[in-house]
Image (cartoon, helix red, strand yellow):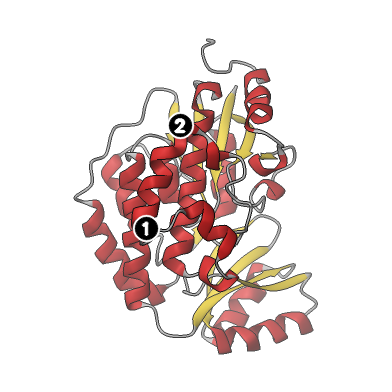
Amino acid sequence: MTLALLCSGQGRQHRDMFALAGDAPEAAGLFAHAARLLGGRDPRELVRRDSDEALHANRTGQILCTLEALGAAAALRDALPDRLVVAGYSVGEVAGWGVAGLFSPTDTLDLVARRAEIMDAVSPAGDGLLFVRGLPHAVIDGLCERHDAAVAIVNPGNGFVLGGNRAALVALAEDAKALNAVRVVDVAVNVASHTKRLATASATYREVLSHVAVAPPAPGRRIISGIDGAPVLDVQAGLDKLAGQISHTLQWADCLQGCVEAGATAFLELGPGRALSDMIAGARCLEEFRTLEGSRAWLRALPLSSGRT
């Protein structure tokens, strides 16, 4: 049995996102490090007290979502199977490199803080993301061309995240509704991630990545690239893709298929939220468990779990 761990992207931050991992002793050092990146604010208090707008600021959001994945993985480590596939959605891909052990956890948090800073520095004012489901890819491409937008993420089942200026996205949303799109909603992200509008951010971030220590993947562990759904077999090529995904379309549907092709037979989304697990029949989300021990028990009940061969 191979377990796929899914590291969530931005947009689903909420008040109780650290309810399970927040008090885990294994994650204490991560919360302390994140607090230093957040100006001394304890992330557990920040999510309870700050406004929704503050929680969804690009830098804060990327740090919080990465902390959730890293903290959950640390708390669950002893119960995880020996064979793991890790995939991450948007900033979750950087978190995934930390969860898979290629980056140290503290380096991972530092890297997502820098990623957000670099993106914010080059992002045109007023940019954002829009989700549209239920229209064919060709129709979505036509809408993007008409409104100077771009496909940022391709999800399963004709689900698309689109990036561009908010005014253009509002007009695009109206056209999508007129074409009977099943769902059209704003995404709580304030940059046009994964579009060419952030091309210079990719180049700058690749330079940042060239200075971080990278460990080889541990035996039995594999990370999937978000750009093409392929396993990362060469670290330097993987770093190229990790930087490139800031300004290139994410093929999340291919990423999930890549997990299956790597042998994944069970899926666990680390959160926040359950957007990714909702895309896969039978997938679990950490937030659906009432306690960490409940999630550990589920993991230990999986065939070939940690400590067994």
Left-right relation of 50 to 182 = left
Left-right relation of 6 to 280 = left
Circle 1 residue: 40
Q: Please tell me which of labels 1 and 2 falls first in the chain.
A: 2
For residue 205, what is the image quadrant?
bottom left
Circle 2 residue: 26
Q: Vertical placement of 219 versus 164: above or below? A: above
Indicate the quadrant containing the N terminus: top left, top right, bottom left or bottom right. top right
How many residues crowd mark 1 within 10 Å: few (<14), some (14–19), many (20+)?
few
Q: Secondary structure at mark 2?
A: helix
Q: Which one is closest to the eye, mark 1 or mark 2?
A: 1
For residue 104, what is the image quadrant?
top left
Q: Vertical placement of 84 versus 66: above or below? A: above
Question: Which residue is painted at 29% across and 41% down in the image?
Answer: 235
**Residue 40 at what x, y percent from top left?**
37, 58
State the residue lying farthest toward the left: 211
**Residue 110 at what x, y percent from top left?**
32, 53
Amino acid type, callout 1: Gly
**Residue 74 at what x, y percent from top left?**
47, 33
